[in-house]
Amino acid sequence: MTILPEPAPPLAAISVRGAIKRFGPITAVDGLDLEVPEGICLGLLGPNGAGKSTTMRLLTGQAIADAGEIHVFEHVLPGDSKAARAQMGVVPQLDNLDVDVTVEDNLAIFARLYRVPSVRDAVERGLALARLTDRRRDAVNELSGGMRRRLLLARGLINKPRLLLLDEPTVGLDPQIRTELWTLIDGLRTEGTTILMSTHYIEEAERLADEVAVMARGKVIARGRPSELIAEHAGRETAEVYGPPDRLAEVRALAESEGLVVRPAGPAIAIVGCEASANGVIPDDAIRRAATLEDVFVRLTGEEAE
Amino acid sequence: MSARRLEPAVIAGVMSREAANFRTYWKGTTFSSVLEPIVYLLAFGVGVGSTLVKGVGSLSYVQFVGTGMVATAVIFSSALPAMFGTFVKERFQNTYDAILAAPVDVEELVTAEMLWIGIRAGFYGCFPLLVAMGFGLDPSFGMLLVPIFAFVTALAFAAFGIAVAASVQKIDQFNYVTTLFVTPLFLVAGTFFPIDRLPQGLRVAANFNPLYQLVELVRAAAFGFEATDLIRFAGLLAFAIVLWRIAVRRMTSRLID
């Protein structure tokens, strides 16, 4: 009888084990474990200062971990980070396009940096993706904010990367442009590009991510599909109670005495997992709704979501 | 597979970024590179030369200043653009963040920036010589080597500027550097007055000034080489290499957390 060897597990696009990164007295990444299988979109959700951007910089070799192991595909970082970056695309949080240079030159420069076989083809593809073919000879500073963001995304995809790092891809954009970019990113996900997307927009994570990893204080504190995270950390229903501050304080105290999680929600308070409450705790005029990822986020991080 | 160090294609890619930007501002740079030596030669060469100083040794004062001003053009088109350009790209434009997210190392980035500035300053450094020809300087075959001398010296000062930019916290700290280093280097380079008439201490110090060595090389290119000029050139080359390594080290510590 021939014993067949067990098939090798599929290669992870990203594998981070026990990564620590300190900046003086501040520990930005604190024992981070993160595995991103190929072909998924993982949303890295966390409040400002959670360590998302530092994690991104660790993956591009622009920050060196003080401890831990980082692999991108078969490459061990930081030693092999240049080869790893050749298989990645990065869309930064801040617009760092060359503003005086034309749209097509911005793409051509990066096509050269990535040594793509045909710079011309890569530029045409990028222009089409960013829907800027007719603006190709315009300087970037003549473009609107949305166009610049699309160009930034096209630049990050100039080398047809296996892995795309999106660092807060829609931060500061108006809702229309945000939706436009989501459609573009969704298309990439459908094509099978592995995406690691840091965001602090709940809706963005819900809309685009196959899985969400919630980060706080430099580590992943929860991970799963959005529906799994909601079921595990926020239950089925959330009750929103509106009213004057005195009344809200009273309801809050009562709910918390029953062990329920209560969080501020704009002018209201939200009682998370309200289906588990005893009679009388949830006021009759409370608005019951399905629990959301926002409830999970606020419950786990203690921060207000955006 | 580890990527190799200093890939020419990557260096060319980074330089292509500089070239694309340069296309947007070359007119202003060229204008000042042509006009500045004309103004200096009118003021010093013609003004001082026809009133205070007739000549230096066997050279007319226009010949003396015209050849010396190559060094002035080189330091002002290498050290200053490197200082301000690097700081602005790093701190305000986040350009280096974008480049280093691509498969480019800091060493390649610094090398490309130095080469670009070196080529540019090597080219613009020759303008004073061309202007001086208009004021009566005779051309010579040796002058064909001046772009190379200017290029190597500019590499060194580009590396100096990059290292300084990677070391300061605020842009106004460049004032200390220009006042303490750049201005004295260009004034005591034998451009406007001969070094051999200075007190001995200053004369010895001037020999360590790379701009003085460049001035001597340019004058040798115009009026005849000597064996010691090879040593001068080797010294400039060594200076450029040492400053290149310092610039790479400073930029690595600045750009990689």
Image: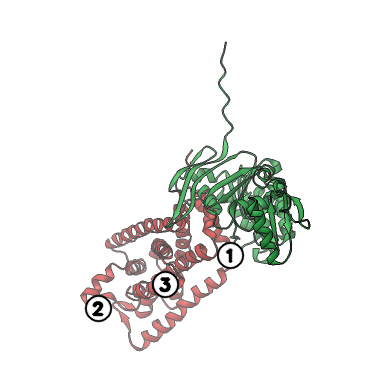
Chain colours: A green, B red
Protein chain holding label 1? B
Where does residue A105 sit, x and y in percent of width and height? 62, 57
Observer able to see residue A132: no
Q: Are marks 1 and 2 on the same chain?
A: yes
What distance separates the C-alpha of mark 1 from that of mark 2? 44 Å
Q: Looking at the picture, how far across and down is residue B238, in whole percent?
A: 33, 57
What distance separates the C-alpha of mark 3 from that of mark 1? Answer: 29 Å
Say which chain tag 3 marks: B
Sequence order check, earlier mark of 2 and 3: 3
Q: Which residue is mark 1?
A: B23
Q: Establish if B181 lies above or below B236.
A: below
- x then y, percent, for residue B201: 22, 74
Q: Tell me if residue A167 can be seen.
A: yes
Q: Tell which of B206 and B69 is nearer to you.
A: B206
Q: Residue at position x 27%, y 61% from top?
A: B227
Q: Mark 2: give few (<14), some (14-19) or many (20+) Cα within 10 Å.
A: few
Name the one closer to the observer, B82 or B61.
B82
The residue indicated by pointer 3 is B173
In the image as oriented, which residue stretches furthest toward the right?
A285
Amino acid at dot 3: Gln
